[in-house]
Image: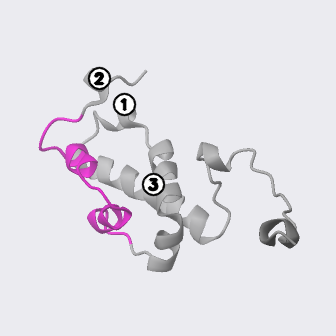
Amino acid sequence: MCTPSLCKPAEGSFLHGLGQLSTAEDFFQALGLPFDQKVVSVSRLHILKRFHDLLDIPALTPLDEAAQRTACRAALETAYQEFAAGGGTKTFKVFQGATMGFVPLGSLTGR
């Protein structure tokens, strides 16, 4: 179980610095990964959510910085490639169980 006291990275550490980043582009730049801006613009939140899901922070914490960086880079690359290839799963609740509906044009125009 990852609780803040167990998983909170030490201030000034690589993981702490990663936690201070705010945009998807920041993560790609910090981890030295090339990316297609079109893919990131369309799927940024899904890529970051998948990246988060792939990370095992408790397992990363005891590793040295180089190993942490390698693991984080691999997780981000995996998440990005899933969406770049068009196969990434949109995991946000709003996309779960969504059904396609049909609304006749006449019902919108009142005709």
Q: Amino acid at mark 2?
A: Leu
Mark 2 and mark 1: Cα distance apart in space: 7 Å
Kindly report the distance in space between the C-alpha atoms of the residues bearing marks 2 and 3: 22 Å
Q: Residue type at mark 3?
A: Leu
64 left or right, relative to 60: left
Q: Which residue is mark 1?
A: 58
Q: How much space separates mark 1 and mark 3, taking CA atoms?
A: 18 Å
Numbered disc in front, either 2 or 3:
3
Who's the residue at 68% across and 63% down the image? Answer: 87
Across and down, in percent, residue 40 comes to 47, 70
> Which region is colored magenta?
9-33
Residue placed most toward the observer, 63 or 102: 102
Reading the image, the residue beneath label 3 is 48
Q: Residue at x 84, y 65 (%)?
A: 107
Left or right: 47 with respect to 82? left
In the figure, is residue 24 to the left or right of 40?
A: left
Residue 81 location (% of width, % of height):
55, 66
Q: Earlier in the sequence, mark 2 or mark 1?
A: 2
